[in-house]
Image (spheres, coloured by chain):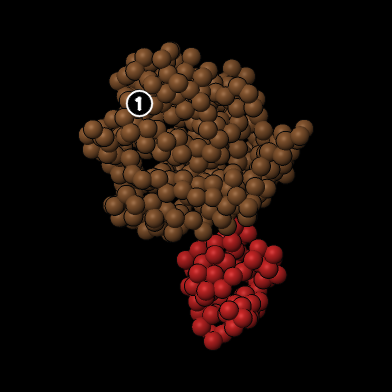
Chain colours: A red, B brown
Amino acid sequence: MSQDILAGLAVILEEVAGVDPADVTPEKTFIDDLDVDSLSMVEVVVAAEEKFTVKIPDDDVKSLKTVGDAVSYIQRAGVAA
Amino acid sequence: MTGGARLLGLGVYRPARVVTNDELAQRVDTSDAWIQSRTGIATRRIADDEETTVAMGAAAAEKALAAAGLTPDAVDLVIGATCTAPSQIPGTGPQIAHRVGASRAGAFDINGGCAGFSYGVSAAADMVRAGGVRHVLVVATERLSDYTDWDDRSTCILLADGAGATVVGPAETDEIGPAVWGHDGSRPDVIRVPGGGDNLFRMEGQAVFRWAISLVPTVRQICARAGVAPEELAGIVPHQANLRIVEALATGIGATNAVVARDVIDSGNTSAASIPLGFARLLETGEIRRGDPVLLFGFGAGLTFCGQVVRCP
């Protein structure tokens, strides 16, 4: 499950911000390691909501620093839904 | 007999003064590289004292009339579309009508924020189709610089001035598709001029960005209502808020054969005026031609949105 989410995020990050999927690993930070700026992060979140059928409110986006944070958030939100 | 409606001509006015990103960086902590990467904006036009909303609107309206091959006495109605009139009262419509010599015309304003032009075209088209009027001038004119906080680096880099107008008139075959519109009036605070002594524009940029890029399904619906597949579009003219939003919407709907208006690069965000300014630019450069299907989509303060597919005048 978490591997599917990770792979899905890698596809989104490549489409939205041109990130090499090989670089998308759980410990990477969006802003510093993957060079995803704040607006791209919003695009990633909107695409992830659609892809994984979850809701990620603005207030929660700020807490998603690393790829791993996002994977576990989506996993929890998916289970809750 | 009820007929169709179409755009008969388009005209724009761009203020003379060009303000660069470097010029803004002298006042607020920002840079050309930062502004271009986040917004796509390289320059914007800022009006001088003579370039009022009415003066700019009238100049655009005269060009739209000339493009339509009409004299001012052919105009039945002038609709001013603005959210930056110099004062609440009076509206710009009657003053623009007077300036262009549309002496027979009725006149009023609408405030649809950045969607004002699309709302105006929709209203005008329905009036023409109903047969009550023949020629309606829709004039979007904005002086956002009057409401700009030049010390707020998150908004002063975006806002700009300008005007664009079109004449909507009768046609045997309808060339203005059904409007798709809606609102999220639960969020009046994300784009606002507070009033009560605070007359400066405020915006929660990321919230607006998120809302705007989530409108892709709405934009697809505009195509569906018009019976035009996204890949059949020759052009897309979203409100020129920010190049990132423009490109996200264009890519999101899969308009693979359309040229995309990127006038925001040179002109900044001119609210309701941005759609006619962007549309006119594509016509001026010859990237779209008479009869081509073009999608217009306005979205912004309210929050409110409106769009339609039209054929090029």
- Between B146 and B112, the one lying in front of the other is B112
Q: Secondary structure at mark 1?
A: loop
- Between B261 and B213, the one lying in front of the other is B213
- Residue most toward the right? B197
Q: Is residue A6 above or below residue B252?
A: below
| Residue B74 place in picture, x, y as percent | 34, 18
Residue shown at the point (59%, 17%) measured from the top left: B50
Q: Which residue in the protein does label 1 denote?
A: B133
Image-based side of A24 in relation to B231, left or right: right
- Between A48 and B180, the one lying in front of the other is B180
Give the amino acid at mark 1. Answer: Val
Q: Is residue B162 above or below residue B58?
A: below
Q: Count how many numbered circles sit on residues in the image.
A: 1
Q: Chain of mark 1?
A: B
Image-based side of B94 in relation to A67, left or right: left
Residue shown at the point (77%, 32%) measured from the top left: B197
Residue B296 appearing in the image: yes
Residue B58 appearing in the image: no
- Locate the N terminus of chain B by quadrant: top left
Residue shown at the point (47%, 18%) measured from the top left: B97
Residue shown at the point (35%, 26%) measured from the top left: B133
| Residue B299 place in picture, x, y as percent | 52, 46
Quadrant location of residue A60?
Answer: bottom right
Mark 1, Cα crowd under 10 Å, few <14 / some 14-19 / many 20+, is some
| Residue B172 place in picture, x, y as percent | 22, 34
